[in-house]
C-alpha cells in the first residue's frame, strides 16, 4: 500500500519531468539540461516533496512544480560539482563538461538554477526555505573541497560536510512539501529533522557500503574511498584508533599515491580496529532519530507509511 | 539637481553594499564575493532600481535590497563570464578564478546567485521579472560564445546578443524598481523599453569607442575588438560593404592570427567604408527610442531628470 503510494508519486514525477524536458528549446544552453535530467535517477528529492505534502493531507499533484524545481536544483549541483571534481562519468554516461565543454556546463548549470527558482519563487516562504538550503549545499561543497587531502579533518567537520552536502536538500524538499500543504511550523521542523537524519544515515551507510558492501550489489569497486584517501567517518575513526594503538599501516598506505595503495591491507586494518561497528551504530542512531521525528508528527499513522517506505528504500535493513 | 539625486542614490547604494560586504563570513565561499563586490564600479544597475522607484514616487531607501540583489546578480555573471572568457583581469585587478581558482569561482558564483535570489524572491512578481531577465543574460552569454569566430554572424544575431547580454539586465533593474513602486503595467513596460534601448545604445557606443575613441579617454587600446576579430556591428557592416566592393583587406587581416593583425590598416579600411556613421546612426536611433519611452511615462517631468542624467552619463554627447 505504502509502496504503491511511493510508486504512484514516482510515476507522476517522471511524467512531469518528461514533459518539462520535451518543452526545452534544442539550443546549446538547454540541450545539456535535457541530457542530464533525462539520465535514469531515483528522484528521491522530488518524491520527498510530494510525500511531505500528502502526509499533511495535500494533493501531491498540486506540488509537482516544486518537486520538479528541487530536482532541477539537484541537477544544477551535479552539473557544476562534476566540473569541480573532474568527473568523467555520471550514472555511467559522460558528464556534461565532458560531452560538451566546461564553459557550456557552467552556463547551462547557471540557467538551470534560474529555472529552478522560476518554480520555487512563486511563494516567498517557499523561496526563503529553498534559498537557505541551497546555500547550505554550496557551503557543503566548499567544505568538501577544503577538507580534501587535509590530514587533520575531524569527525565534526566531516559530519557537518555531509549534513550540508547531502542531508540539507532532502530536508529542504520535505520542508517545502509540508509548507505547501499548510503544515504548522513545528510540524515543518519535525519533517525537516526526519529528512536531515535520514540523509545523514544514508550517506554514512553509503560510506560503509563502499568499504564493506558486496561489490556485486553496490556496483562499485570495494574500497574506492580508501584508495582515494577520502576522510570518511570510517577512516577518521580508524586513524584515531590506530594512532592510539601505535599502528602505522594506514598512515603508510595514505602516504602512497592512490594507485599504489594496498586497499585490501587497509580494509583488513579497518576490520581489526572494529570501526565498522562504530559507523553502523552512527547510521542506526540517525535512522532512529529520523523515525522518532516522523513518529512525533501529529497525523494518522497510515499517512506515514509511504515515508517509512522511503526510509526503508534508502537505508535497507540496517536495524 | 538631477545630478545631485543621482549622486545621493549612488551614495546610498555604496553604503548598502559596504554593509553587505562587511557582514560576510571570512571563508573560502564568501571571500571572493567580498573581493569582487569591493572593486570600484559604476553601480549603474542598482542605481536604475532606485531611480525607477523614485520616478514613480516611491522611497528609494525602500528598494535598496533589490538594488543590491541586482548588483549581486551582475557580479555573479562577471565571476562566471571571466572563467569562460579566460580573462586574467577585471577592473585592473586579478579575476576571481585567477586569484583563487576555477572551482572556487564556480562555487562562489553559484552561492552569489542564490544570495541575489534571497533578496529578489521576497515578492513573486519581482522574482518572476528577475528570473526572466536572468535567463536572458544566460542566453546572451551563450549566443556570444556561439557567435565567436563564426564568419557568418549577421547584424540581427549580434543585436540580439547585445540585447540579451547587456540591455536586458538594465531593463530588468528599471522594471523591478517600477514594480516595487506600484507603477501600472504599461508604465513598467515603458521604463523597461527605456532601459533596453539605453543599454543597446550604450553597447553600440562602446563598440564605436573601441575603434574610433580616444585611447587617453577610453583607457583601452584602440581597436582591441578588431584585433580579437570580434564581430561587432562595425565589423559586420564593414565586411558587407567591402565584400560588395570586392575589397579584401579586412578578410586578409582576419585570416591572420590576432597578434599578427595590422589593426591600423583595418581601422583605415573601416574609415574609408564609412561604417562609423552607420553605427553612430544606430546609437542615436536607440538613444532616441529610449528618450521617447521615458517621455511617454505619465509623471511630472521634473521626476525624470535623474534618468535623463543617467542616460547622459552612459552615452555622453552623442546627439
Image (cartoon, coloured by chain):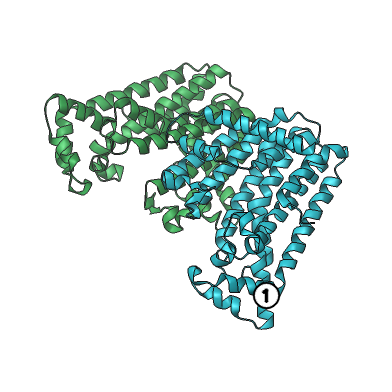
Chain colours: A green, B cyan
Q: Is residue A11 left or right of residue A202?
A: right
Vertical position of residue A162 compared to residue A256: above or below: above
* Furthest residue toward bottom: B246
Residue A281 percent across, percent down from the top left: 28, 23
Numbered disc 1: what chain? B
Residue A11 percent across, percent down from the top left: 52, 42
Element type at mark 1: helix
Residue A294 percent across, percent down from the top left: 46, 21
Q: Is residue A220 left or right of residue B221?
A: left
Q: Nearer the viewer, residue B130 or A53?
A: B130
Q: Nearer the viewer, residue A32 or B153?
A: B153
Q: Which residue is mark 1?
A: B240
* Mark 1 crowd level (few <14, some 14–19, many ≥20, 10 Å Cα): few
Residue B203 percent across, percent down from the top left: 67, 55
Let me know if residue A17 appears in the view: no
Q: Nearer the viewer, residue A195 or B216?
A: B216
Amino acid at each position: 500500500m505504502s509502496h504503491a503510494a511511493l510508486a504512484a508519486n514516482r510515476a507522476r514525477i517522471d511524467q512531469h519531468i518528461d514533459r518539462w524536458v520535451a518543452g526545452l528549446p534544442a539550443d546549446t544552453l538547454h540541450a545539456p539540461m535535457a541530457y542530464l535530467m533525462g539520465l535514469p535517477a531515483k528522484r528521491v528529492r522530488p518524491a520527498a516533496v510530494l510525500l511531505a505534502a500528502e502526509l499533511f493531507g495535500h494533493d501531491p499533484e498540486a506540488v509537482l512544480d516544486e518537486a520538479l524545481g528541487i530536482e532541477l536544483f539537484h541537477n544544477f549541483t551535479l552539473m557544476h560539482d562534476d566540473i569541480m571534481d573532474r568527473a568523467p562519468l555520471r550514472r555511467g554516461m559522460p558528464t556534461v563538461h565532458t560531452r560538451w565543454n566546461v564553459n557550456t556546463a557552467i552556463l547551462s548549470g547557471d540557467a538551470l538554477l534560474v529555472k529552478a527558482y522560476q518554480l520555487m519563487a512563486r511563494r516567498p516562504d517557499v523561496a526563503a526555505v529553498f534559498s537557505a538550503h541551497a546555500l547550505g549545499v554550496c557551503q557543503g561543497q566548499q567544505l568538501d573541497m577544503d577538507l580534501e587531502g587535509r590530514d587533520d579533518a575531524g569527525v565534526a567537520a566531516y559530519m557537518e560536510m555531509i549534513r550540508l552536502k547531502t542531508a540539507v536538500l532532502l530536508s529542504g524538499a520535505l520542508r517545502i512539501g509540508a509548507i505547501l500543504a499548510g503544515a504548522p511550523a513545528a510540524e515543518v521542523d519535525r519533517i525537516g529533522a526526519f529528512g536531515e537524519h535520514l540523509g545523514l544515515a544514508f550517506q554514512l551507510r553509503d560510506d560503509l557500503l563502499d568499504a564493506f558492501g558486496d561489490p556485486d550489489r553496490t556496483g562499485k569497486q570495494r574500497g574506492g574511498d580508501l584508495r582515494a584517501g577520502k576522510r570518511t567517518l570510517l577512516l577518521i575513526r580508524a586513524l584515531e584508533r590506530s594512532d592510539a594503538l601505535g599502528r602505522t599501516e594506514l598512515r603508510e598506505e595514505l602516504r602512497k599515491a592512490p594507485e599504489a595503495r594496498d586497499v585490501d591491507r587497509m580494509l583488513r586494518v579497518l576490520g581489526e580496529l572494529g570501526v565498522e561497528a562504530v559507523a553502523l551504530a552512527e547510521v542506526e542512531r540517525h535512522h532512529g532519530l529520523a523515525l522518532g521525528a516522523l513518529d512525533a508528527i501529529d497525523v494518522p499513522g497510515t499517512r506515514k507509511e509511504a515515508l517509512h517506505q522511503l526510509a526503508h528504500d534508502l537505508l535497507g535493513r540496517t536495524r
